[in-house]
Image: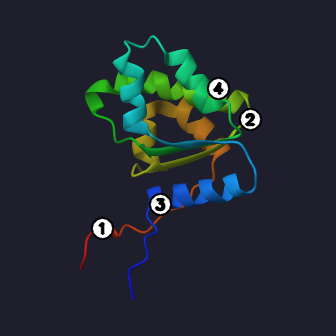
Amino acid sequence: VSQSRYGKTHTLYAIRSVVKNWGQDCTQVENWVKLLFELKKDNFSKVDSIIEKITRSQFIFIDDLGAEKQTSSGWADEMLYLIINEAYNRECTLFISTNLTEEEMIARYGDRIKSRITEMCTEVEMPDKDWRIKE
């Protein structure tokens, strides 16, 4: 019997697949670190278009929130706020995966972002076991 692969990222992709099969408009699963890299690589000239691309869909998927380097957190916080706030204003459905605890999320991103995420999302705790590590 093979081990099940029900990690956070896999779960996001599975949910997106179901939503897409329902015929709903949804974004790709956006890896947070890769998304920050995309925003930064053009010297922030495409911030508006990238945020529009992400938030134009009813269902938004962000994977690995909190995986970015702490040194970039000032502007990363601003980018997260812009995305979360736009999704909030448009009443989008938001799916986020993270390894951060609630306390770590507040410490890193602040109460404003955390309160919006809390209102928009239902927390589902995943087991600590990493399916990629064989016992």
Residue at image location 43% in from the left, 32% down from the top? 35
- Three-letter residue code for mark 1: Arg
Q: Secondary structure at mark 3?
A: helix
At mark 2, the secondary structure is: loop
Find residue 36 and report its image quarter: top left
Q: Residue at x 38, y 83 (%)?
A: 2
**Is 124 above or below relative to 40?**
below
Q: Earlier in the sequence, mark 1 or mark 3?
A: 3
**Residue nearer the viewer, 24 or 113:** 24
Residue behind mark 3:
10
- Residue bearing the label numbered 4: 86
* Amino acid on which disc 4 is placed: Glu
33 is higher (above) or lower (below) than 42: below
Residue receiving disc 2: 91
Mark 1 crowdedness (10 Å alpha carbons): few <14, some 14-19, many ≥20: few
Crowding around mark 2 (Cα neighbors within 10 Å: few <14, some 14 to 19, many 20+) is few
The CA span between labels 1 and 2 is 35 Å
- Asked whether disc 4 touches disc 2, contact meaning CB atoms under 8 Å apart, the reply is no
Determine whether, in the image, residue 21 is placed left or right of residue 73. Answer: right
Quadrant of the image containing the C terminus: bottom left
Front-most of residues 31 and 83 = 31
In primary-sequence order, the first of circles 4 and 2 is 4
Provide residue 123's location: percent of width, then percent of height.
57, 55
Label for residue 132? 1
Q: Is residue 56 left or right of residue 37?
A: right
